[in-house]
Image: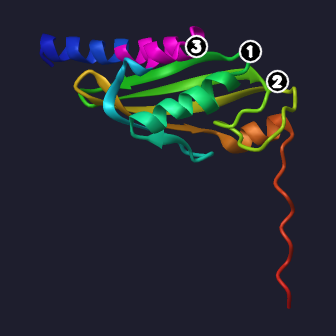
């Protein structure tokens, strides 16, 4: 790997870290949007939330994400892999389910239980701007920790 490619990969890490810091710690929508490509896409896979396109992503962050972050949300990175096109973070996410979380658990009332769940973010870049984010988490473990159960399925009629 050349020094210029290594520096470029470090630059991608800095962009992602700045984006996360703006969202999670500072809760600053403008600063978070500054790190995005012209036509970004965000998909939270288990919940199928997010948005495609600048306006949809901005609405997602402004309406569903930022006002609904748990007060004690913490992220602890386990691992990170970076190449010239993408970054993958494996992170432990901890929080108390103290409010409705439409971006994570649409339609679920607060349980006031504590949860810690593994999340994986796959971040694609357009040069040094975030083009896409696909965020996956262990939804089954999250549901068990929060005491959320799916409605019982009814047996098919015979």
Q: Position of residue 33 (x, y in %)?
A: 42, 21
Q: Which residue is mark 2?
A: 98
- The residue tagged 1 is 71
Q: Label 1, label 2: how many angstroms apart (C-alpha)?
A: 8 Å
Residue assigned mark 3: 27
* x 81%, y 34%: residue: 145
Let me know if residue 138 is in the magenta part.
no
Foreground of the two, 149 or 44: 44
The percent position of residue 95, horizontal first and vertical second, equals 74, 21
Q: Secondary structure at mark 2?
A: loop
Question: Is residue 96 rendered to the left or right of residue 38?
Answer: right
Query: How far separated are the C-alphas under marks 1 and 3?
Result: 11 Å
> Can you tell which quarter of the image residue 49 is in?
top right
Q: 36 or 135, which is in the foreground?
A: 36
Q: Are marks 2 and 3 in contact (CB under 8 Å)?
A: no
Q: Is residue 23 magenta?
A: yes
Segment tinted magenta in the rendering:
15-32
Pick the quarter of the image with the N terminus: top left
Check contact, mark 1 vs mark 2: CB within 8 A. Answer: yes
> From the viewer's perspective, is the residue at label 1 or at label 3 nearer?
3
Of residues 13 and 31, the one drawn nearer to the viewer in this rendering: 31
Q: Residue at the location (55% across, 45% down)?
A: 45
Residue 143 occupies quadrant:
top right
Q: Secondary structure at mark 1?
A: loop
């Amino acid at each position: 790997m050349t020094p210029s490619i290594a520096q470029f990969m470090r630059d991608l890490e800095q962009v992602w870290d700045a984006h996360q810091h703006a969202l999670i710690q500072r809760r600053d929508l403008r600063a978070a949007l500054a790190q995005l490509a012209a036509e970004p896409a965000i998909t939270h896979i288990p919940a199928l939330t997010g948005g495609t396109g600048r306006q949809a992503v901005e609405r997602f962050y402004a309406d569903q994400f930022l006002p609904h972050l748990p007060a004690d949300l913490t992220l602890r990175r386990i691992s990170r892999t970076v190449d010239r096109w993408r970054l993958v973070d494996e992170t432990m996410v901890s929080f108390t389910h103290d409010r409705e979380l439409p971006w994570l658990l649409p339609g679920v009332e607060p349980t006031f239980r504590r949860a810690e769940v593994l999340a994986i973010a796959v971040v694609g870049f357009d040069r040094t701007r975030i083009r896409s984010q696909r965020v996956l988490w262990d939804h089954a473990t999250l549901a068990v920790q929060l005491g959320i159960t799916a409605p019982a399925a009814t047996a098919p009629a015979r």
